[in-house]
Amino acid sequence: MRAHIITYGCQMNEYDSHLVASELVSLGWELVDSVEEADFVLVNTCAVRGKPVEKVRSLLGQLRKEKERRGLLIGMMGCLAQLDEGQQMAKKFGVDVLLGPGALTSLPEALKANERFWDLTFREDVLDYIPPPPKGALSAHVTIIRGCNHHCTYCIVPTTRGPEVSRHPDLILKEIELLKQAGVVEVTLLGQNVNSYGKDQPGFPSFAELLRMVGGMGIPRVRFLTSHPVNFTDDIIEAIAETPAICRYIHLPVQSGSDRVLRRMAREYRRAHYLERIRKIREALPDAVLSTDIIVGFPGETEEDFQETLSLYDEVGYDQAYMFIYSPRPGTPAYKHFQDLPREVKVERLMRLIEKQKEWSYRRNLEWVGKTVEVLVRGEAKEEGFVQGHDRGNHPVLIPAAQAPVPGLYQVEIKQATPHLLFGEVVGAREPAPIPLPVA
């Protein structure tokens, strides 16, 4: 039997898809690269914004036609599967297996069933599962905490993924050790809010303590996503500053620069608190690369509110930003209680914010010209004749392909910058380097 997995959404979904893929292989399934080759197609879904939901809707329509033609087994998992919206979609398009984000370990049972199988429970054993290292990977993700206890009015994640539950530190460290033995040189710790790690389990280390533990394991690069400004405490900053393996790339979503909008979003902090966190980071980590998330056009956002977001952007001077127009999601308080703004207003503000982002990203990127950075080269770039990687600050870096013939860690001098890319030349490699891909 042959299976194909299609993944939408965040790094957590990528991790969950790898977990499920390892389950399928252990059950004797062969993983294939296309729908046409597969007997079972499993779609891992995202429900944070409307666009990925529409992509899933379109895909399921195509899969239903394929099922009618040759008896294909269709599966759906992830955040959308946990919602009424996704379940209605599953019924409409003839989905056979439906698994919520907390029920991934039910897959063997689902495949043994001779009828439609749906499981939307939050099973504790999903926290205990350690997937094998991804084949041939130099970087990998490790989930340290699932769920979220914050209830932002625009966000569906607390509904889809449940409350925060931390994984046992022994399991996390064991998984990372296996990745290290497999040749992985960069690990990203994942959670909806990694800063809350350990708070739900007496006796567990704090997130700062976990960072120090992971940072001492011999993995050259350790990163983490995603943080919440309320929980990004001084001890976390100190752990980053005192642990060389922890990359000084900090993604700290602000969402808006307006206190009035932050209050309507139920973000639990205000502009002054956020800027105080930025000040602490800059003091302890002057070379830190800062990125953020911003939602444009949240219900009730005035032009004055938006100007406060622009002024905050200038005050922080972000290196990078992920910017989105507000997308109403059924099941959220904002969808139920707030009137959406006209799309043309949201789009126009987004365009202005993007111009602000380009200006600052270019300014920040220029500061790296002439410096030598460590780049993890992954493979070919879209640009002909180049390979692409990223430095410890998460900047995409392009290098002439002849200078980095195999993936690995290289020392690269930055020669040129654009708002979104750095261009460099290899001046050395980490010992032992370049790090080759494991041989199959």
Image (cartoon, helix red, strand yellow):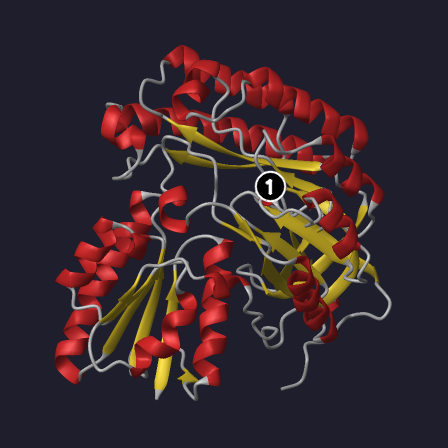
Res 339 quadrant in image: top left
**In the rendered image, which quarter contains the C terminus?**
bottom right
Residue 262 falls left or right of residue 76: right
Image vertical order of residue 103 relative to residue 271, above or below: below
Viewer-proximal residue among 184 and 345: 184
Residue 348: where, in percent of width, then height?
Answer: 35, 25
The residue shown at (53%, 29%) is: 254
Residue ID at (57%, 35%): 228
Above/below status of 4 relative to 79: below
Residue 16 visible in image: yes
Q: Is residue 273 above or below residue 366?
A: above
Above or below, 296 against 142 in this view is above
Asked if residue 252 lies left or right of residue 180, the reply is left
x and y, in percent, of residue 172 in the image:
65, 61
The quarter of the image holding the N terminus is: bottom left
Which residue occupies the foreground of this view, 399 or 337?
337
Left or right: residue 210 versus residue 31 is: right
Where does the image place residue 262, in percent across and percent down from the top left? 45, 21
Residue 405 in sight from this viewpoint: no
- The residue carrying mark 1 is 196
Q: Quadrant of residue 336?
A: top left
